[in-house]
Image (cartoon, grey):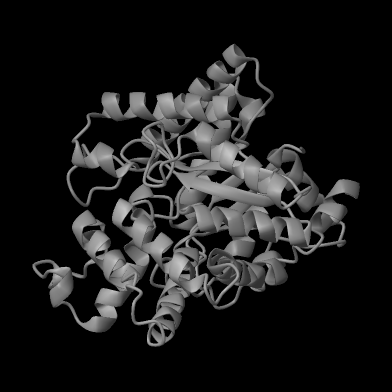
Amino acid sequence: MLPLRDVIARIIRLRQEGRAQMTLLAACPNSSAVLEAAVMVAASNNTPMLFAATLNQVDRDGGYTGWTPAHFVRELQTHAARYACRAPLYPCLDHGGPWLKDRHTTDRLSLAETMAEVKATLTACLEAGYALLHIDPTVDRELPPGQPIAIETVLERTVELIAHCEAERTRLGLEPVSYEVGTEEVHGGLVDLDSFCAFVQGLRRRLDEEGLGEAWPCLIVGKVGTDLGNPVFDPGVARRLYEIVAPLGSLIKGHYTDWVENPAAYPESGMGGANVGPEFTTEEYLALEELSAREADMLRGRPLREASRIMEALEEAVHESGRWRKWLRPEEQSRDLRDLPADRRVWLVQTGARYIWTDPRVREAREHLYENLSAAMPDPHHFVVARIARSMERYITHFHLFDAQTLLDVA
């Protein structure tokens, strides 16, 4: 499998030669169904697929998916075999840095403690065979609220974590790994163009000083207009960032690409990659909602069967998780989920569903739903996976990824 940094180099060359433009899709594997759908899409389109797993999703403690890094890679390989996928599948760490795992914040870990945890996870990712590590030390919970972290601090911690990875990779006798750096978040202090340039130039200098020039990142995250509440991509900003990093052998990665209104502008402006996550969770939720409605219709003719009550189980599990509170608006802070307007409650449950797919009550209700429907549907699970896949296909089309691997093989 071609290393990601070589893939990025080929994408840059294809663009510069005027032969092709493409943007790699990075699916956030926030559930087993999303992971399966992404592999199926990669196989049917002969395109590389990135899998950007956060510390909350996949970690040494299992994360909310229940997967350790090694387990996650095994699941990926199992689906690849099932769908006879010959296109490369790249397991990646997303936002690997201090306090970017929720438990590190709630447990009030010190800088030394959270850095030690992150380093241990980076080693586990290397051992599992991850292809890309996103190094993101742009959060500092020891600073006063509202005070941004200094760029110099971000640089020093980025170099420290990359140095750890390179030392561990050498110790383990592994081939070179690819890196991603930066953040789209305001707390990272890298949002305006001057700060972005200062970070890129400073990182180049510091890596060279430490003898780590070969570990230069192939992807650099940029603030390109989108966030969880704004689906509009800014191609002008993306082009300016591309012009800064492409001469260095890197491309820009966009996060929060969910529901973006102008996805075709990504390859046109030189974007190297784009993360999508909450959108796929919502599609999974909506698929289950549709199946629940079908179940209700079906059970009117089968009164002896008990309904799965899958939607009630989902809302109850999200409510008890408390995760929905992170998206409350200022005026909602003192309110309970069940006291919010229906549209807000549904949005919070849809968005928070990714945290509770493995909750025993949800899994039991889902199995019950599938069992009920199996009397009238050949494969309810495939119905869910196929709906998620249709959402992914939109990006495949607009990012020019159909049969992209053939082009990359000969570039």
Looking at the picture, tell me which residue is in the foreground, 267 or 67. 67
Looking at the picture, tell me which residue is in the foreground, 34 or 121. 34
Residue 207 at x, y percent in the picture: 56, 27
Looking at the picture, tell me which residue is in the foreground, 128 or 300. 300
Residue 54 at x, y percent in the picture: 44, 45
Residue 375 at x, y percent in the picture: 52, 73
Specify the quadrant that holds the N terminus.
top right
Residue 237 vertical position relative to residue 35 in the rendered view, above or below: below
The number of numbered discs placed on residues in the rendered structure image is 0
Looking at the picture, tell me which residue is in the foreground, 362 or 37. 362
Residue 364 vertical position relative to residue 287 in the rendered view, above or below: above
Q: Is residue 271 left or right of residue 309?
A: right
Which residue, as the protein is rendered here, is positioned at the far front? 304
Residue 125 at x, y percent in the picture: 52, 31
Which residue, as the protein is rendered here, is positioned at the far top? 171
Q: Residue at x 53, y 48 (%)?
A: 52
Q: Residue at x 87, y 47 (%)?
A: 409
Q: Is residue 361 left or right of residue 47?
A: left
Q: Residue at x 39, y 64 (%)?
A: 368
Q: Residue at x 17, y 77 (%)?
A: 340
**Residue 4 visible in the snapshot:** yes
- Place residue 264 in its image quadrant: bottom right
- Place residue 366 in its image quadrant: bottom left
Q: Is residue 333 left or right of residue 251?
A: left
- Place residue 362 in its image quadrant: bottom left
Which residue, as the protein is rendered here, is positioned at the far right? 410
Q: Is residue 189 left or right of residue 206?
A: left
**Residue 133 visible in the snapshot:** no
